[in-house]
Image (cartoon, grey):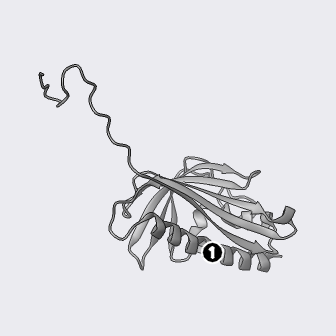
Amino acid sequence: MEIHKEGAQQGRAPEAAEAPEQWRGAVEAPLPGTPAGAAWAHVASFFSAHLYLPGIDVCERVSGASSEEDEDGRLVITPGCVRHVASSAAGLWAREELLEADHAARRLRYAVVDSNMGFGRYVATLRVLDLDGGEGGCMISWAFECDAVKSEGWSEAALVARLGASVKGMAERVQQLAAVAQ
């Protein structure tokens, strides 16, 4: 058999590149007594993650979004806008692009487009869902799918645990702020 420079044997298809391992999951946190609309007003604020996510102390608009503000003084967000989020204490940062903002469904989707955490592809969906038809409050759901992170100290279980702690802390902060606003 003849071997070509590309390494494929003549008459055979080249071996397909192995697809990276995929991680998928979701974490949730309830906000008892908090109406979904009140929670959504905070969760939908794409450039305010530092106000709601434990450990995040930087959240800045990099590009996109309108310079207009909504009735609550937040920047009007549109898909394609990019934010820079960081934890100064942990030395971690990411640039995240908003893929979808569906206010009627109370859903945001974003992708990590650059980071120092070892992510390849990472897409997350944040949703605010009614509990018991809205009578029992609401819940924040954070679903994700990503290529397996190859950096030391990361595993799928570690990522789920980190996101679980984050959504719980986010729910506590949003619930406090929503209670103050009522």
Q: Is residue 145 above or below residue 170?
A: above
Spot occupied by residue 178 in the image (x, y as percentages of width and height): 76, 74
Q: Position of residue 161 (x, y in %)?
A: 52, 72
Tell me what residue is drawn at x 55 percent, y 57 percent. 144
The quadrant in which the N terminus is found is top left
| Residue 16 x, y percent position in the rendering | 32, 35
Looking at the image, which is closer to me, 121 or 83? 121
Secondary element type, mark 1: helix
Question: Mark 1: few, some, or many residues within 10 Å (few <14, many ≥20)?
Answer: many
Residue with the mark numbered 1: 168
* Rendering coords of residue 102 (x, y %): 70, 50
Q: For residue 29, what is the image quadrant?
A: bottom right
The C terminus - image quarter = bottom right
User: Which amino acid lies under the numbered mark 1 shown in the image of this protein?
Assistant: Lys
Q: Nearer the viewer, residue 37 or 77?
A: 37
| Residue located 32% across and 39% down the image | 17
Q: How many marks?
A: 1
Name the residue: 67% across, 73% down: 171
Residue 82 visible in image: no
| Viewer can see residue 164 | yes
Q: Quadrant of residue 119?
A: bottom left
In the rendered structure, the answer to whether residue 22 lies left or right of residue 26 reads: left
Q: Is residue 132 above or below residue 81?
A: below
* Residue lying at the far top of the rendered structure: 11
Instruction: Look at 17% across and 30% down and name the residue there.
Output: 6
